[in-house]
Amino acid sequence: MLIPLIENKIPFIDVRAPSEFMLGAVPTSKNLPILSNNERTEVGKIYKESGNKAAIEKGYSLVNGITKDKRISNWIKFVNRNPQAKMYCARGGQRSKIAQNWMKESGIDIDIVKGGFKALRNTCIEVLDNASRDDKEWIIIAGKTGSGKTKIIKQLTNSIDLEGLANHRGSAFGGFETLQPTPVNFENNLAYDYLSISSNKVFIEDESKTIGRLVIPKNFFNKMNSSKLVVIQEPIENRIENIYNEYVGNEIEKIGEKKLLISLRYNLQKISKRLGGTNYKIIDNLIKDAFQKNDKNIHYEWIKTLLNTYYDKMYGYQINQKKDRCLESGTWKEISHFLMSYY
């Protein structure tokens, strides 16, 4: 069973090539490849043309001398820092076994993961599937845009920050300068976070099926949609202030006014059809005006217009479908207090 390795967050040496690692890995792994991308390509070509034995010989010819010593040295340094470390390649085959033997020749014993990354990946998928059927009580934190749902999630120890894992705030305006993780990494990280919760209660922010370009696993999302929820009912003035601080004030400090103006107008364009032509033009002009005049009040105005004409209408329909699952509703402070006492 590989679940204890995930629960205990055992460190791993991932000896796959960097191109494989970039597509997906487990969060406690470090990529210290036995073959570089180019070397792997060369070995793969020989394998197709001449078979396994010739490919192994090619690998040994590419990784020898100083190159080999350097790679072994990197593995040893990692193990010295992480004595519990284990090693894996794609399927627990030749690369990890060769690396294990080289380490043994250097006086270091390290276990390899049977089945390699594929087995770890399948275990993460299994964790997420089982999560939808276990007996833990899930509480979904809902509320209109700007209600401070993520802030509450971060205050609770037995919570899962889906937006944090996805590196996206969930709305058309929710992207960051940094890229979202790959779907594999998102799901693997979610599995790790879920297993780290020992409590019988789990708090999760209300989300749509997709967060940016990432999709919440089907069974996991279905359980979210059938779980009890609490609803934050925060005054619109507070929500506007929250949205301004997060999406305008903080972003100006990070990327500057010019980049932010371009980004906001681009994101607004993405929902222009759903807004309707008139509303789109009004909000777009307000955004341009707010930056040109450096006027916080005009920023408040376009945010309020966007909430009234789009986000709040959409939310009202969605929450109406979920009202029979509601445990509690109230202001941010009231919901925060309720959840703190609830668990």
Image (spheres, rainbow, N blue to C red):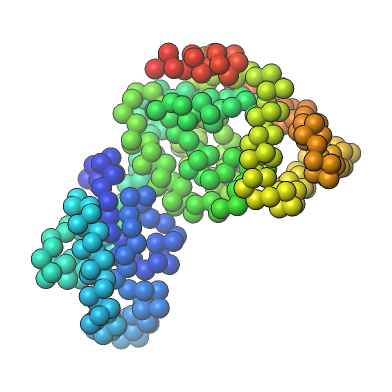
- Residue 8 visible in the shown view: yes
Residue farthest toward the right in the current orientation of the protein: 278
Q: Where does residue 39 sit, x and y in percent of width and height?
A: 36, 79
Q: Image check: 89 left or right of 313?
A: left
- Asked whether 76 or 164 is in front, the reply is 76
Q: Residue at x 38, y 36 (%)?
A: 194
Image location of residue 275, percent across then percent down: 80, 38
Is 153 left, or right, of 260 in this rendering? left
- The residue under the point 36% across, 74% down is 36
Query: Residue 52 or 94: which is nearer the viewer?
Result: 94
Q: Quadrant of the C terminus?
A: top left
199 to the left or right of 111: right
On screen, 323 above or below 177? above
Q: Position of residue 273 (x, y in %)?
A: 80, 43
Q: Number of marks in the image?
A: 0
Residue 195 placement: quadrant: top left
Front one among 136 and 13 = 13
Would you identify the image quadrant in which residue 8 lies?
top left
Q: Residue at x 72, y 31 (%)?
A: 311
Image coordinates for residue 320, horizontal then vertical, percent: 65, 20
Task: Give 142 or 248, whichever is nearer the viewer.
Answer: 248
Is residue 310 at least partly visible in the picture?
Answer: no
Q: Is residue 42 above or below residue 283?
A: below
Quarter holding the N terminus is top left
Using the rendered view, name the quadrant where residue 73 is placed: bottom left
